[in-house]
Amino acid sequence: MTSHDEDPEETEDGATAASAGGDHAADKGVVRRERFSGGPARAFLSSLAADERIFAADLAVDRAHVVMLAEQGIIGADDAAAILAALDDVEAAGHGALPDGEDVHEAIETAVIDRVGPAGGRMHTARSRNDEVAACIRYRLREDLLATVGTVVEGRETLLDVAATETETIMPGYTHRQPAQPTTVAHWVCSYESALARDTERLLDAYGRVNRSPLGAAAFAGTSFDIDRERTAELLGFDGIVENSMDASSARDFLMETSATVTGLATTLAGLSTDVVEFASDGYIDLSDDYASTSSIMPQKKNPDTLELVRSRAGDVASGLSGLVTTLSGLPRAYNRDLQRATGHAWDAVDAVHEAVPVAVGAVATADWPAETLEAAAGDGFATATGVADRLAVAGIPFRTAHELVARAGDLADGGNPGVEAIDEACREVLGEPLEAVADVAAIESALDPVENVAMRDSRGGPAPAAVEAHLDRTREGVAADRETLAGRQKRIEDAEEALDAEVSSYV
Ligand code: ARG
């Protein structure tokens, strides 16, 4: 945009488009001349306080819209300059200084008209609060989504660092909360990093649908003005437009998708929290005091409260998601004011997880893992049994027979862990032959040792230290790629902000 002096577009009756009807229409300087302005339901209707979250977004959306209107010759460059200057002033005064209004859109418009006079009323040409608010929510939510991705990526990096130092730290592994097979702390940590990697993927995927511009849809039915929807989308750093104008002003599935995605993330964190709470109870982890709490009456207590609070965030976001789905279900086309109440659920959801991620990760990263206790417990409940059966199967015994044999050895040990003697006895019972006749006794003995038992399981993604090292190498590449994607999206937003600033400066 180099020249701002084109005349506003002529309408059929020869009047300039935005001034048709005359500037005196806004002679009170108040949006919509106080129609429906009072009454007991005024505060009930208003979202102005909650809209603080989209104050900056609305200013950006206003600026992009005004620049586009001027470029298209729909409003004059002088009016655009006056409106853009007023928006700077409104921004400097802050959300708290806005006049009363049903929402931030109306209040900003009133503030602009207060400063510019009736020509300020041209700002709302060729749009509605319906496309405006949808654009504002998407504009702000994309920032929140990227911030959340940022904390998750950082959390994953931290978890990988923890894993790298604990590849040899043997610990018990469970299924059904029963001792199952020995594993390592690193393998456990990586399991959550893997889940967080998918959460990252889902957040980035949701971002692609959030970052679309509904602007130009107007109330729902488009406009007769010669607007340029791609231009406002570009000025605001959106990746494209939501094409159908009825869809654009009504759609909130992007809120639902974000909330669902975030609920998935919260569920991952809740699982990690429960593990840590149980590890703490078993004496398998020693949380830093920074992530623990105590009792007001029981002096000996050190409680994993922070993790319990992380876990509870899953409840917050799931209830928000359910509220959102309930609000959105069955709404008719096009815009309905119910949508005003939908937005808050998504803000609450992103805030809930954004705060929880660093706490969950911090608790793990600062904890001590008592290696001796963990290793001693790793074989409890004959958790080495599967490894022993595997070794018998390697020696040529069908796995099902080996399974039966090892189970019999477990019975013979009567609650304790069987040694090679019990396995030998079971072998004679089940196969009619001594152990040394069917397998390498030393190999069986080593399978009974939790450390060896873990080292054996070196299949890809398994817990053997070498397998975890290889996994860590691959995973670090994945995190780095996500970090790059994140940086690219942040850069695109920053570039758009700079470009919009430059456009605005060329008028003001
Ligand atoms: N505050 C409203 C919201 O959040 C803005 C749109 C109002 N539109 C309307 N037709 N009443 O949805």
Image (cartoon, rainbow, N blue to C red):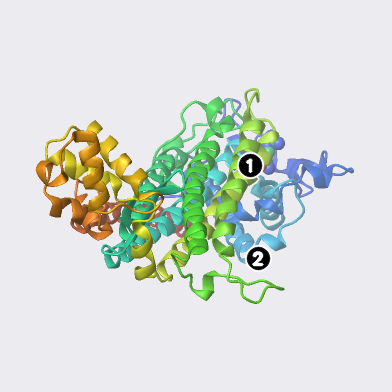
Name above or below for residue 389 compared with residue 379: above
**Between residues 390 and 505, which one lies in front from this camera angle?**
390
| Residue 1 screen position, x and y as percent | 39, 49
Identify residue for label 1: 319
Residue at 39% x, 51% y is: 381
- Residue 62 in the figure: left or right of residue 438: right
Mark 2 residue type: Ala
Asked whether mark 1 lies closer than 8 Å to ligand 1, one says no
**Between residues 132 and 299, which one lies in front from this camera angle?**
299
Assess disc 1: are there few (<14), some (14-19) or many (≥20) residues with their C-alpha within 10 Å of its C-alpha.
some
Ligand 1 quadrant?
top right
| Residue 62 screen position, x and y as percent | 56, 48
| Residue 318 screen position, x and y as percent | 59, 42
- Residue 66 in the figure: left or right of residue 458: right
**Between residues 16 and 457, which one lies in front from this camera angle?**
457
Q: Can see residue 16?
A: no
| Residue 306 screen position, x and y as percent | 56, 63
The image quadrant of residue 259 is top right
Name above or below for residue 405 compared with residue 424: above
